[in-house]
Image (cartoon, rainbow, N blue to C red):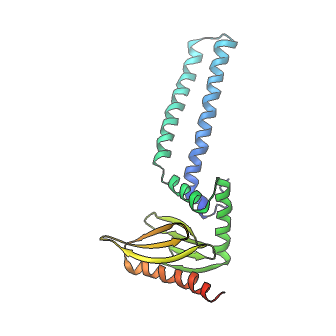
């Protein structure tokens, strides 16, 4: 399923794999319970030697299910998926896959700029940020109204203002924030002013 994955699907595949494992564990548990039901009630074969390994397997499946639940809770992919759903008004993984295909196609053919040591890519419809510190964000360029640099005591941030919301990209250096802000203004605002 994940052959020829796009950029987004590679980022969220761990969470998706956990979902598939959850389905597998549920299926195995149902099969084991059906086997126990068959042995106890239909064949009336209640040998302790037959039933004990099955209950051991069911116990292992339950422990695996609990471990999987804890892994999913700690997974950092779910916030990324939720952010994609919210930012792009998506409702399913299939829609994320379609968005991913569009993003990859635009990066290949309609790339406008690459900045911040190749960690930010701008296309006609998307602004992709993939910092080495683990920060991965995808922003739409449609309805982008303003971009500004803000500073706090410890870091700088580039604030993207949209029609109905704002998004923030944190930076360690002011120079990096200004570099990206300059590219965004040049490629999205100046082009619109000239009507191109």
Q: Is residue 117 visible?
A: no
Q: Is residue 43 left or right of residue 55?
A: right
Q: Give whichever of 39, 47 is nearer the camera.
A: 39
Q: Is residue 173 left or right of residue 165?
A: left
Q: Position of residue 97 (x, y in %)?
A: 66, 59
Q: State the image quarter where residue 85 is shown.
A: bottom right
Which residue is located at x 49 percent, y 36 percent? 66
Q: Is residue 29 visible?
A: yes
Q: Give whichever of 117, 155 is nearer the camera.
A: 155
Q: Measured along the vertical axis of the image, is residue 160 above or below residue 58?
A: below
Which residue is located at x 65 percent, y 69 percent? 104
Q: Give whichever of 116, 82 is nearer the camera.
A: 82
Question: Total label count?
Answer: 0
Which residue is located at x 57 percent, y 58 percent? 86
Q: Position of residue 4 (x, y in %)?
A: 67, 61
Q: Position of residue 158 (x, y in %)?
A: 44, 74
Q: Measured along the vertical axis of the image, is residue 70 above or below residue 86?
A: above
- The quarter in which the C terminus is drawn is bottom right
Q: Position of residue 165 (x, y in %)?
A: 52, 66
Q: Measured along the vertical axis of the image, is residue 90 above or below residue 158?
A: above
- Residue furthest front in the image: 164
Q: Is residue 183 left or right of residue 91?
A: left
């Amino acid at each position: 399923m994940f052959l020829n994955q796009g950029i987004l699907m590679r980022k969220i595949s761990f969470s998706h794999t956990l979902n598939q494992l959850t389905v597998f564990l549920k299926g195995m548990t149902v099969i084991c319970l059906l086997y126990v039901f068959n042995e106890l009630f239909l064949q009336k074969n209640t040998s302790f030697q037959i039933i004990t390994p099955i209950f051991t397997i069911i116990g292992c499946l339950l422990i695996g299910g609990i471990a999987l639940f804890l892994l999913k809770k700690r997974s950092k992919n779910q916030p990324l998926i939720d952010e994609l759903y919210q930012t792009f008004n998506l409702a399913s993984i299939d829609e994320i896959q379609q968005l991913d295909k569009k993003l990859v196609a635009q990066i290949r053919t309609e790339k406008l700029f690459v900045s911040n040591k190749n960690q930010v890519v701008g296309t006609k419809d998307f602004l992709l940020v993939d910092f080495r510190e683990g920060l991965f964000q995808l922003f739409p360029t449609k309805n982008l109204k303003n971009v500004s640099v803000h500073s706090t005591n410890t870091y700088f941030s580039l604030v993207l203002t949209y029609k109905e919301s704002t998004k923030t990209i944190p930076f360690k250096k002011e120079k990096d924030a200004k570099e990206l802000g300059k590219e965004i203004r040049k490629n999205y605002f100046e082009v619109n002013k000239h009507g191109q």
